[in-house]
Amino acid sequence: MRTRSERRYHRNRSIKRKGEIIQNTWGRNFDDLEPSRIGQLSKGKVHCSCGMCQQKSSKYLKHSDKKKIEKLNDRLENFISSEDY
């Protein structure tokens, strides 16, 4: 069984990591958050339902999929423009 200090350590580590994500994504300083809001970062989810976070798990295409489609379109254009067609 974990001791309180272990749970506290992992909770603070999780809060720090998610605070860095907020700082890198939104440009907000982690130290400017209200003390009552910092505890919410210990919860499981890092994302929300905003447009930036939603793109990762919704109907939008991934970057790699867009590149594949672009590559296929280029190949199709080359095939159509060739004289053998």
Image: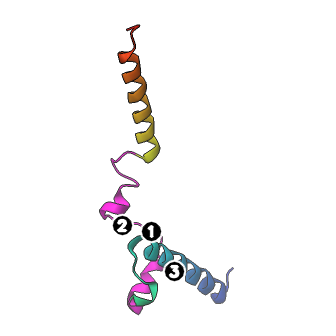
Give the residue pinned by disc 1: 45
Give the residue pinned by disc 3: 15
Q: CA distance from mark 1 to mark 3?
A: 11 Å
Under mark 2, the amino acid is Cys
Depicted 24 relative to depicted 49: above or below: below
State the residue in front, 10 or 70.
70
Indicate which disc, 1 or 3, sits on the residue closer to the N terminus: 3
Image quadrant in which you'd find residue 36: bottom left
- In reply to whether residue 71 is colored magenta, the answer given is no
> Could you tell me which residue is drawn at 42 percent across and 70 percent down?
25
Depicted 62 relative to depicted 25: above or below: above
Under mark 3, the amino acid is Ile
Residue 32 horizontal side relative to residue 12, left or right: left
Q: CA distance from mark 2 to mark 1?
A: 8 Å
> Could you tell me which residue is drawn at 56 percent across and 81 percent down?
11
Image quadrant in which you'd find residue 67: top left
Indicate which disc, 3 or 2, sits on the residue closer to the N terminus: 3
Q: Secondary structure at mark 1?
A: loop
- Stretch of the chain drawn in magenta: 34-61
Categorize mark 3 by other alpha carbons within 10 Å: few (<14), some (14-19), many (20+).
some
Figure quadrant of the N terminus: bottom right
